[in-house]
Image (spheres, rainbow, N blue to C red):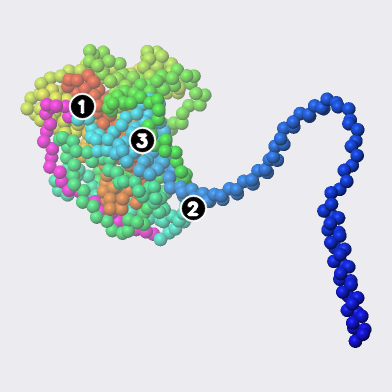
Amino acid sequence: MRLYLRCARRSARFITFAVVMAAATSLAAQAPAPKPAPKPAAPRTAPAPKPAARPAAKPAAKPAAAPAPAPVPAPAPPPPAPEDVRFKTSYTTGGQKTETVTFVKGARERFEFQDMILLKQHDERRNIQISRAANTYLVTPDGAPSAPPVAAGAAVAPPKPPGVVMVSTTIVDTGERKAMFGQQARHVKTMIDKQPMPGACDATKQRIETDGWYIDAPKAMAAQPQTDPARTEVAGVCLDQINATHNGDPAALGFPIAYTTTVSADTAKPAVVSMEVTEFEVTTLDAALFEIPQGLNAALNMGELSKALSNANEAKLVAADSAPAPTAAAPRVPGVPRIGVAEFTNKTSQTVDTRGLRSRLITDLVVAKFDAVPMAAAPPAELQKRAAEFGYDYVLLAEVADLKVSKPGAIGGMLRAASRVTGSGGDAKDITESSIDVKLVQPDGKNRLSATTKGKDGSAFTMQTGLGLARFAGTMYMSMMMGPSMMYRLNGLGGANLGGMGMLGSPDLFRTQTSSLGAAGLGMGVDGTAGAAAFLLQQAMAMNGTGGLVGAGQGPSYDASLGEALDGAVKAVTKSLQPK
């Protein structure tokens, strides 16, 4: 207990002491501190100049933000698959060969026949003939008459009522197949039998047999509209109705790659033509190929195009005749005389197409199996010199000696009216007579023939009448001779070389083929390039009839009488060169 009390007293004392000490410390802190002694004043000096203020530091440039990643472009769509078509074709008949190039794009086609180009713009419903040599083009609307219109007031015999022609086609797929241009080609044979019914204007029976290889028609080809180049309504013309039937599947035909066609008629020996596609590609073509090139001259009609072609051809002929003779002569057929035919001279007061007469005489000589070539106008001595340099056997000199017109009697008027049906021109009240002086001279100057031949309207079948019949009545393929004659005439105009196509260039033959296979459409066995040639040939026939040979279409026509006189000249030449 005592110990407890003693400890308690000690604790109280300690507490009292702690309190007193704390109070003393607090009072000492509050008492003011003693002031220090003042220091002596320092001497005054001018204040130092303040340093120039430093420009405020620019804040550090923030680092450029990283560009946002470019969006990944969507993959470009693949280019459209090519659909255009380009192919090269070779045609052969007899000793002649023709090469063509054809382009097809959308609704347009381009056909190249050496110098001549044909554009078919189906979307514009027009055709464009382009002569590169003449730097001239002619636009022809689809369906425009291909023959010169009949002059107003001219007498026209009433046309014969049209008849009916039956055309039957048989198609046989042989089952043979082979690879051609990366596709499977089918071997197909066709036979077209044409039988005119009684009363038909075209009374010619015909058989067309084709042995060919075909592939599926390319899309661009199958899309082309079917073309009939030969049916044009013209006053005084009879066009038969064609009734077509077929046996077999036209789809077996398709696009022709190669074929051989034999055309047989009841009045002539068979004509054989072969075709082969030598290049073929599906590609993308430049649209400019199917437009009229810049810088060409526009012909307003067939007459202007004919003149441009004639001038261009004559310029080439003059240049060729003026150039040094070739070291090697052009190939020749053994035993066939080569005759240089000079441009006609004219001693009448009438205007005469002397170049046209030369072309027609060359045509007749070629048909008569002579090797005839044109020569530019020159004096006889110069012509003989050039003939010797070029290796010609003869020079044929011809001159229009006389042109007469007279009034017909009753029979003559009927004959003249009949000639109007064939498109030979002229007025039904006039009959014309023509005389031509002909000389066949050797290069050494020796005369082989000197004769005068005459012609009269309505006397005989003439070349001009033949052209009319070919154009309107469908008898162009009646003889083997007429086909080469037509082709050669087009060549003589400087337009194209179609000789190798033979009868395939006949507008009437093409019409028969398209009529027989019309249900299949163009590209199903029908050769569109041959159709283009048929169009050009038909235009050439119309060109031939434009203006006439005398008077540039003014006054009576002398075409028929001059045609007969030319026939007589060829007969005289043939007789003079027969072995004695």
Residue type (three-letter) at the residue carrying disc 2: Gly
- Of helix, strand and loop, which one carries label 2? loop
Q: Which residue is mark 1?
A: 560
**Residue at x 74% of width, y 32% of height:** 54
- Of helix, strand and loop, which one carries label 3? strand
Q: Which residues are magenta?
A: 150-174
Image spot of residue 303 (x, y percent): 27, 25
Q: Which residue is mark 3?
A: 118
Q: Are marks 1 and 3 in contact (CB under 8 Å)?
A: no
- Between the C-alphas of marks 1 and 3, the distance is 31 Å
Q: Which residue is mark 2?
A: 182
Give the camera-side residue of 343 and 43: 43
Residue 368 visible in the displayed image: no
Whether residue 151 is situated above or below residue 69 in the rendered picture:
above
Residue 357 visible in the displayed image: yes
Residue type (three-letter) at the residue carrying disc 1: Ala
Image spot of residue 561 (x, y percent): 20, 24
Q: Is residue 311 left or right of residue 330?
A: left
**Residue at x 51% of width, y 49% of height:** 76
- Quadrant that contains the N terminus: bottom right
